[in-house]
Image: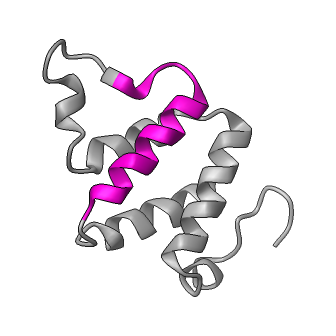
Amino acid sequence: MTAGDGGSVEELDALSTEELRERAFHRAEDKRDLRFFWDLVTHLRGASDLSENDGSGGGLGETVTGALELVTELLGRHDGSLEPLLRARYIDYLRTS
């Protein structure tokens, strides 16, 4: 892999979901990419609770640290059924960002 290249789909697909998550989160954190974290939040169960009261992003906040904490909390709640979706999202992000 070279700088700016997340690797081939085959290389990335061979990694564990945890390794993909760590790489994608690290890249998004370095780039201060709140959009990446918000995209994940919209796919995770429990995210609807965030905007129930006022239609906003709730606890997502405007900082990468806040977004990272929220996504990590929501990931801890999911039952594994979203793993294929999350893996695809991580791989896509690593390939295109």
Instruction: Determine whether, in the image, residue 53 is placed left or right of residue 69.
Output: left
| Residue 7 pos. (x, y %) | 71, 73
Q: Is residue 69 above or below residue 6?
A: above
Check residue 77 for magenta coloring: yes
Instruction: Determine whether, in the image, residue 54 is placed left or right of residue 58.
Output: left
Q: Is residue 19 above or below residue 73?
A: below
Q: Residue at x 65, y 83 (%)?
A: 11
Magenta residue span: 59-78
- Is residue 22 something that shows in the picture? yes
Q: Residue at x 37, y 56 (%)?
A: 75
Instruction: Determine whether, in the image, residue 76 is placed left or right of residue 17.
Output: left
| Residue 16 pos. (x, y %) | 54, 81
Q: Is residue 5 above or below residue 7?
A: above
Q: State the count of labels.
A: 0
Check residue 51 for magenta coloring: no
| Residue 62 pos. (x, y %) | 52, 19
- Foreground: 95 or 27? 27
Instruction: Determine whether, in the image, residue 97 is placed left or right of residue 72.
Output: right
Question: Of helix, strand and loop, which mostly describes the magenta segment?
Answer: helix
| Residue 74 pos. (x, y %) | 33, 49
**Image quadrant where one finds the N terminus:** bottom right
Q: Residue at x 18, y 33 (%)?
A: 49
- Foreground: 50 or 92? 50
